[in-house]
Image: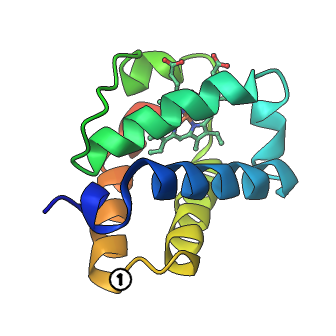
Amino acid sequence: MSLFEKYGGFETVSKVVSELYDELERNDITAPYFENSDIRALMDHQVKFLSQVLGGPQQYSGKAMSAAHTGLRITEEAFNTVAQTAQDVLEDNGVEDDDVAHIVGLLASLKDDVVQA
Ligand code: HEM
């Protein structure tokens, strides 16, 4: 069974992504990056992206991570804040420690593509 199915599929992924963005919009380090974004479109992309990372049926067909973040000057501090917030939100939603570690590891592997400051 994929992690996607294990944790309730699309509904859980949507909830996690929505909570993650609520936190990131409240955080002084990350909020400025999202000021000019269409949050709904971004969340839709993120849900698809995360669903695919978790082995779900949704196909992410957006830009590659490096292209998606070009010009945004995302710092290592901002990346680490996003990764830490994702970890907190996953834990708050009952995702088991091993699975959280796996997902956070996947996110960490994208750091060099996302951090371009
Ligand atoms: C591993 C972590 C991350 C993943 C998986 C991720 C994923 C994505 C995806 C799927 C998109 C949409 C691409 C598209 O439109 O086709 C996106 C865009 C974006 N990401 Fe990330 N992201 C990550 C880290 C970050 C960080 C750390 C920041 C800033 C603190 C950030 C800020 C943004 C912004 C501002 C956009 C929208 C750009 C626009 O409005 O066109 N991302 N990200």
Q: Residue at x 41, y 33 (%)?
A: 48
Q: How many marks?
A: 1
Say above or below: 27 vs 59.
below
Query: Vertically, is 30 above or below 12?
Result: above
Tell me which image quadrant ligand 1 sits in: top right
Q: Position of residue 83 (x, y in %)?
A: 52, 59
Q: Position of residue 35 (x, y in %)?
A: 85, 29
Q: Which one is nearer the viewer's eye here, 25 or 29? A: 25
What is the residue that sits farthest to the left in this orientation? 1
Under circle 1, the secondary element is loop
Rendered residue at 73%/29% (across/down): 39
Residue for point 68% across, 58% down: 19
Between 66 and 52, the one nearer to me in the picture = 52
Quarter of the rendering containing residue 99: bottom left
Q: Nearer the viewer, residue 9 or 28?
A: 9
Task: State whether label 1 is within 8 Å of ligand 1.
Answer: no
User: Is 75 situated left or right of 49 in this image?
Assistant: right
Instruction: Find residue 59 and report its horizontal and vertical position in percent.
Output: 29, 26
Residue at (49% x, 58% y) in the render: 12
Q: Is residue 16 visible?
A: yes
| Mark 1 residue crowding within 10 angstroms, few (<14) / some (14–19) / many (20+) | few
- The amino acid type, in three-letter code, at marker 1 is Glu
Quarter holding the C terminus is top right
| Image location of residue 94, percent across then percent down | 47, 81
Look at the picture and state if 7 lies above or below 108: below
For the N terminus, the quadrant is bottom left
Residue marked by disc 1 = 96
Residue 112 located left or right of residue 72: left
Q: Would residue 115 be seen by someone viewing this image from the given angle? A: no
Q: What is the image's colouring?
A: rainbow
Residue 66 lies, with reference to residue 106, above or below; the image says above
